[in-house]
Image (cartoon, rainbow, N blue to C red):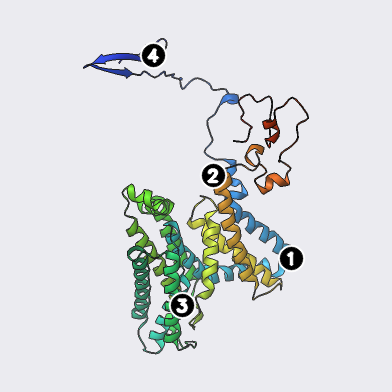
Amino acid sequence: MKINEKTGEVKARLVLKKNKVTRRWRVKYERTDRLDKIDSRFDTRRSPFKLKKLHPRNIGVIYLYAVAWLLFSIWVPSTWLTWLTHRSVINQQSILIVVALGLLVPLSAGVFDLSIAATVSASAVTVSWLLVDHKWNVVPAIVAALTLGLLVGVLNAFLIVRVKIDSFIATLGVSSVLTAYSVWRSGNRSILGLPESFKAITDEFAFGLTRTVVIAIVLAAGLWFMFEHTPVGRYFFATGGGRDAARLAGIHTDRFISGAMITSALFSAVAGVLLSSQFGSIQAQSGAPYLLPSFSAAFLGATQFKRRFNVFGTVLSVIALQSGVKGLQLAGVGSVWVESLFFGCALIISVGLSTFQKRVHGGQRRWWRREESGPEYLLGRLLGWGPRKLSNATDSESDKNEWWHDPSDSEAHHHKP
């Protein structure tokens, strides 16, 4: 096919071939020499770095952490501006990071796992019971606790994939069963007297940080690599984005949902082992406080950086929220109710921001445009963007009923659809 080099274009023409009329198209093209200078006033090429990445909507957790630093540096500088305070926050919340990281996998696949807290308690009670009452060695006891977590994940996967029970209901029922197991196995008492070799797992590693922090960093790095650089991570997000569409695209969604539930249970079992080693004693309800903070951190992290569930956003959310709780406790605001209040508000705000971004910034409407925020929305009523009377008597009655009318707009772009 020849193209006119002078004009750079060839128009469409009809060609008769084998008693069929077909149309051959030639596309107009324009070549720009690389040496030609481009006027910067009309250059539409985008920079790889965009200022909107610094918007609070994208990195709000960092701004929240900066505000907490500034507030508590002025409020309680003697205790806040010390490495001991922040070291204790990181050491204490490394177990929460492990649980929240495990929760990311089922959430990315579009299912819930409400049994994470009960799995933490069950694995902690199991390893403590084997070490104290039956005098098992450390390694077999840990393997038994992790095996319990594996069985819990398989049970959750079976109920969701095979029995077709909703993940919310299935994991809630399994959580109740695991709680009953923990109470029965521990005798509803604290298990004390764990061996020193087992407590050494969470001893200090470097700079005052414990080995639990190192384990959390290793698990976070592995999970980040899977999500961002492997097809498995993309398949998880495809399954969570649309299970039917992913299945029609050739993805075995049942396998990925099963793998997500097993991974979450294994992470919770690891957190239970670390919890019993760090505190040296365990109770049947020791893992219950990790349920709400894990969901709060996961959903708040999903509104950061990538607008989906991601590792960096979750880890930073845990650190920022727990630092705020720690600062309020140092200031004497409260020590019992403040953490529940903090994480409950974080969960509500994070889910609300996620819904707001999908509706407003996802293309449904723009709140700053009058034609897309009319009187049917609360913001439109507050700003007075409702129906108004037209002073021109020659306008038609239909125009008077419009909530916003521009007579000069002949194509009716600003009329209510």
Q: Which residue is mark 1?
A: 75
* Amino acid type indicated by mark 4: Lys
CA separation in Å, label 2 and label 3: 40 Å
Q: Residues within 10 Å of mark 3 (few under 14, many from 20)?
A: many
* Amino acid type indicated by mark 3: Ser
Residue sitting at x 54%, y 40%: 49
* Amino acid type indicated by mark 2: Gly
CB contact under 8 Å: marks 4 and 2: no
Whichever of labels 1 and 4 marks the residue nearer the N terminus, that label is 4
Q: Which residue is mark 3?
A: 121
Q: Residues within 10 Å of mark 4 (few under 14, many from 20)?
A: few
Check the image and report above or below for 28 versus 62: above
Q: Quadrant of residue 187?
A: bottom left
Return the residue found at the far right. Answer: 391
Return the residue found at the far front. Answer: 397
Whichever of labels 2 and 1 marks the residue nearer the N terminus, that label is 1
Q: In the image shown, does 123 or 203 lie closer to the viewer?
A: 123
Q: Which residue is mark 4?
A: 11
Under tag 4, what secondary structure? loop
